[in-house]
Amino acid sequence: MTNQADYYKLQSAANARRTVGKVIIYALLAFWALMVLFPFYWMVLSSVKSYGAYNSEFIPKFFTLSPTLENYVSAFTAVPLGTYFMNTLIFTVATTVIMLFVTVFAAFAFARLNFRGKNIAFILLLALMMIPNELVIVTNFVTITSLDMRNTFLGLILPSVTSVFYIYLLKENLAQIPDELYYAAKVDGTSDLKYLFRVMLPICKPTIITIVILKVIECWNSFVWPRLITDDASYFLVSNGIQEIRENGFGRENIPAMMAAVVVISVPLIALFLLFRKKVMAGVARGGTKG
C-alpha cells in the first residue's frame, strides 16, 4: 500500500509539472501572438477612426466608439489605388505563371532526365544562391535599361521569372518519386511530358501550391525592384504606390486614410495564407523529407 501511495504521489507530481509547463508555454504563445497581431490591430483601428478623432487623441486609444469607413473611400478616391492594385495583379499573375513553367521544367530535367554535365549544372545553379541580391539588382537594372524596358510590365516581370530556391525545392520533391514509376510509364510508351503532368505534378501538388503562394506573396510585397525600374506612376505597384502616398500624397497628414490603404493591400495576402496555410506547411515538410 505504501508503494502504491508513493506511486500515485509521483504520478500526481508529474501531472502537476506537465500542467504548469503547458500553462507557461500557452502563456508565452499567447503573449507572442499578441505582440505579432497588435500592429495589425492598431492599423485596422486607426483606419476606422475619423480624421478629427485621430488627431484629437493626445493619448492614443485602443478602441473607438464611432468607427467610420470614410478613410477607405478616401484611399481609393484621393489616389489611384485601384490602378496600383491592377498593376500588382498583372505583375503577380504573369510573373507567377511564367516562373511556374520555368521551375517545373527545370526541376523535372534535374530530377529525372539524364544528360551530360547535369550534376555540374545543378551545382552551378545552386551556387547562384550565394550571389548577393544587390549585385543581381545592379546587373538586372543595367540590362533592362539597355533594352529600353524601364516603365514597362516586361521590365518588371522578366527579372523575377526564375528562382533557384523553388527549382531546388521542387527538384527534391520530384526526386522522391520512385524510379519504377518512370520506367513503367516508358514501357507503356508514355512521353516525358505526359509522365510529368499526369504522374509527377499531381503527386507534388502540395509543393506546387506552396511555391505559387510564396511567389504571389513575394510579388505582392515586391518593393526594391519596382521602385528602381519605374518612375511613372501608371506602372506603380501597391508597395510603391503606398510609399508614394506616404512621401508626397495625403498620407503625410491623413494617417487614418493611409492606414486604410495599407489594410486594403494587406487583406488579400492574409486571406490567401489563411486559406492555404495547411498546403504551405505540407509542401515545406515534404520538401524537407527524403526517401
Image (cartoon, helix red, strand yellow):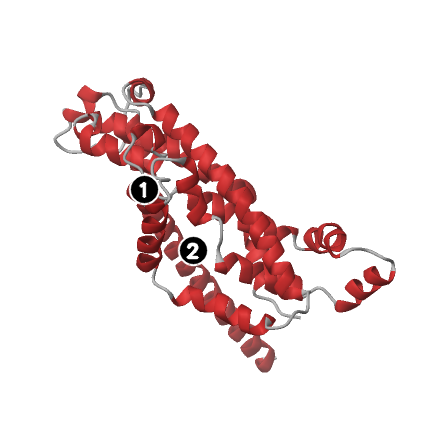
Q: Which residue is mark 1?
A: 229
Q: What label does residue 107 carry, if any?
A: none
What amino acid type is highlighted by mark number 2?
Tyr
Dividing the picture into quadrants, the one containing residue 60 is top left
- Could you tell me residue 119's position as x and y percent? 58, 73
- Residue 26 disc label: 2
Question: Is residue 220 in view?
Answer: no
- Element type where label 2 sits in the image: helix
Q: From the viewer's perspective, is residue 44 above or below residue 37?
A: above
State the CA–CA distance, disc 2 to disc 1.
46 Å
Q: Is residue 288 visible?
A: yes
Q: Quadrant of the C terminus?
A: bottom right
Coordinates of residue 287 in the picture (x, y in percent): 58, 62
In which image quadrant can residue 58 be found? Answer: top left
Q: Residue at x 27, y 25 (%)?
A: 257
Q: Are marks 2 and 1 in contact (CB under 8 Å)?
A: no
Disc nearer the start of the sequence (2/1) = 2
- Residue visible at 41% across and 31% down? 87
Q: Secondary structure at mark 1?
A: helix
Specify the amino acid type for callout 1. Ile
The number of numbered discs placed on residues in the rendered structure image is: 2
